[in-house]
Amino acid sequence: MSPKTRLTLLRIFIIIGVVALTIFLISIRDQIKQLEGYGYPGIFLVSMLATSTVIVPLPGVLLTSMLGMAGFNPLLLAVCAGAGAALGEMTGYMVGFSGQGVVERSKFYDRVLKWMEKYGSITILVLAVIPNPAFDIVGMVAGVMKMPIPRFLLFCAAGEIIKYLIFALAGSGLATYIK
């Protein structure tokens, strides 16, 4: 088997795996919410699983707001949720790495590619802060560009932590207001 054939098979395997993971996570979304009972490690897992789906988002930020209302420390909540979310975003990265022909046909792809070429990793940071289901495209573009994984994870985690801190503080503030 030639190296090109092996790479093609690897890419197909990764795409099938990500699709299967997405379908599985959507099918057990109610059970995922029960992980919050395990404290901060549970929050990390819930956040990772919520962002592991590609294009079909699970409500991770809303859960973070609710946990902020429940009395979790907003900073620790944001760090655990943000780190888990960044790790979960690796599914988008892997789709981009393995299926670059599919990703390049997206209209948003060209825009994100230009931003990443012009502003680099800051694009990942800024777009990770903004709650949007299209962030998977950012991971896909990073994968297509073969961005080093540690760099992708660092900027993604920083943006996710900022986003989750905003939601955790909002939930905590709302809880204080309601009391």
Image: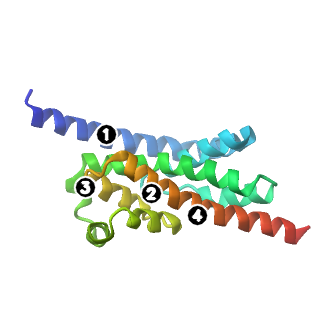
Comes first in the chain, label 1 or label 2: 1
Position of 18 with respect to 57 (left or right) is: left
Mark closer to the observer (3, 2): 2
Residue sitting at x 67%, y 46%: 33
Residue to which mark 3 is pinned? 145
Q: Position of residue 49 (x, y in %)?
A: 54, 45
Disc 3 and disc 2: Cα gap in Å? 15 Å
Residue sitting at x 65%, y 66%: 166
Q: Residues within 10 Å of mark 2 (few under 14, many from 20)?
A: many
Disc 4 and disc 1: Cα gap in Å? 28 Å
Residue to which mark 1 is pinned? 14
Disc 2 and disc 4: Cα gap in Å? 12 Å
Mark closer to the observer (1, 2): 2
Mark closer to the observer (4, 1): 4
Q: Position of residue 7 (x, y in %)?
A: 18, 37
Comes first in the chain, label 3 or label 4: 3
Residue to which mark 2 is pinned? 155
State yes or no: discs 4 and 1 in contact (Cβ < 8 Å): no
Comes first in the chain, label 3 or label 2: 3
Disc 1 and disc 2: Cα gap in Å? 23 Å
Residue to which mark 4 is pinned? 163
The amino acid at mark 2 is Phe
Mark closer to the observer (2, 4): 2
